[in-house]
Image: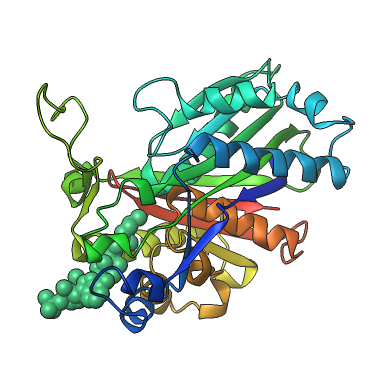
Amino acid sequence: MAIEIIATGRALPSHRISNAQIAEKIDTTDEWIRSHTGIGFRYIADAQTATSDLALLAARNALSLALENGSVQEQSLEELALTLDMIIVGTITPDYYGTPSTACLVQHELGALHAGALDINAACSGFIYGLENAAGLLSLNQERKRALVIGADILTKIVDWEDRGTCILFGDGAGAVLVEKREQGEERRGLLRTILRADGSGAESLIIRRGGSRNPYQRGEIVDKPPYVQMDGRAVYNFAVKAVTEIIEALLACESIGIDAVRWIVPHQANARIVAAAGKRLGIPAEKFFLNIENYANTSSASIPIALDELNRREEIKRGDIIITVGFGGGLTYGGNLIKW
Ligand code: COA
């Protein structure tokens, strides 16, 4: 049995803002943001757009690509949606806190009448966790064949726009992959290996303190801003460099392959310096890492599937290529997938 990604899609809000535009509002500069993070622009959702809207668009784009590239036999998007067995959305910015899940909203809009649906909260590692969960669910039950795995977040609605240490980092977006369970041929392919790890001792270093059961809003309280992300940037940075290094090493070791066998490492796009530092520690050339952070900033769980979609549509990933994804985020969570495309 092979769990293969057979199509990809992405969706971004239409409004794109530059570092210079942010610098008009807060005390920062394009130069500082670029030199400390590699970020140049980010897309920002408008007031009417919620996470499920972007997730739905990315999902439709992935399904449309599957229809176009002939990897499925169905003739229409509606027909294809009916074949989905599972919809998983990695997100920490659901349309509604608690319930309903964003995945259920996507399931309804797609008309995926036979699919189960659930959200995964693993912050920026959401897609990596989601892909492994989809693979597990497809493997467990003979009847299940197809799953949509989506990473979608609108972080710009929950950052503190007065905190220059965090607000400059994030952007909005969604990425999706259509996953299918297929017969294994002579060669192993598809999702070959996943490593999922967590370090809850670092929970406080990336946290949304208000609104949950630990610290709910109180009756009569005047709330003058939405719940927002608080971050110990330096702690997250150090954790992230270690996490990326550890996961790449572990994935290569598990499969007994060298870095030369890998076509792309697709890292979570949080900070280009994190990727450069991990690459340097591992002695891996910068060209092995796919980076698009300049355009999108950190789109949280969407960053890896957006990157996969870019590569796929530019035909920079070919069948048989080995891809490593690696990510880290709030929780703290981290992990990676090793995929033979
Ligand atoms: N513009 C200008 N100056 C800024 C700034 C901004 N947007 N943000 C912070 N600064 C200032 C600080 O106030 C500080 O000034 P001081 O020396 O006068 O006190 C100085 O820059 C250095 O701040 P510091 O926080 O030490 O910077 P840094 O080099 O650690 O970079 C981050 C900050 C946030 C870019 C970096 O820590 C980081 O990327 N961490 C990981 C964050 C992350 O990826 N989070 C998501 C995980 S999924």
Instruction: Give percent across and percent down for residue 71.
Output: 84, 41
Instruction: Give percent across and percent down for residue 233.
Output: 22, 63
Quadrant position of ligand 1: bottom left
Visible in this render: residue 68?
Answer: yes
Color style of the picture:
rainbow
Depth check: give the residue in front, 150 or 185. Answer: 150
Q: Is residue 261 left or right of residue 95?
A: right
Instruction: Give percent across and percent down for residue 117.
Output: 55, 22
Asked if residue 11 is positioned above or below residue 121 in the image, the reply reads below
Visible in this render: residue 237?
Answer: no
Q: Residue at x 67, y 48 (%)?
A: 9
What is the count of numbered marks? 0
Q: Residue at x 57, y 53 (%)?
A: 12
Q: Residue at x 53, y 34 (%)?
A: 52
Looking at the rendering, in which quadrant would you find the N terminus?
top right
Instruction: Give percent across and percent down for residue 33.
Output: 34, 76
* Res. 86 image quadrant: top right
Q: Is residue 188 left or right of residue 133?
A: right
Asked if residue 173 is positioned above or below residue 66 in the image, the reply reads below
Q: Is residue 317 left or right of residue 204?
A: right
Depth check: give the residue in front, 231 or 325. Answer: 231
Q: Residue at x 68, y 45 (%)?
A: 190
Depth check: give the residue in front, 340 or 36. Answer: 36
* Res. 40 image quadrant: bottom left
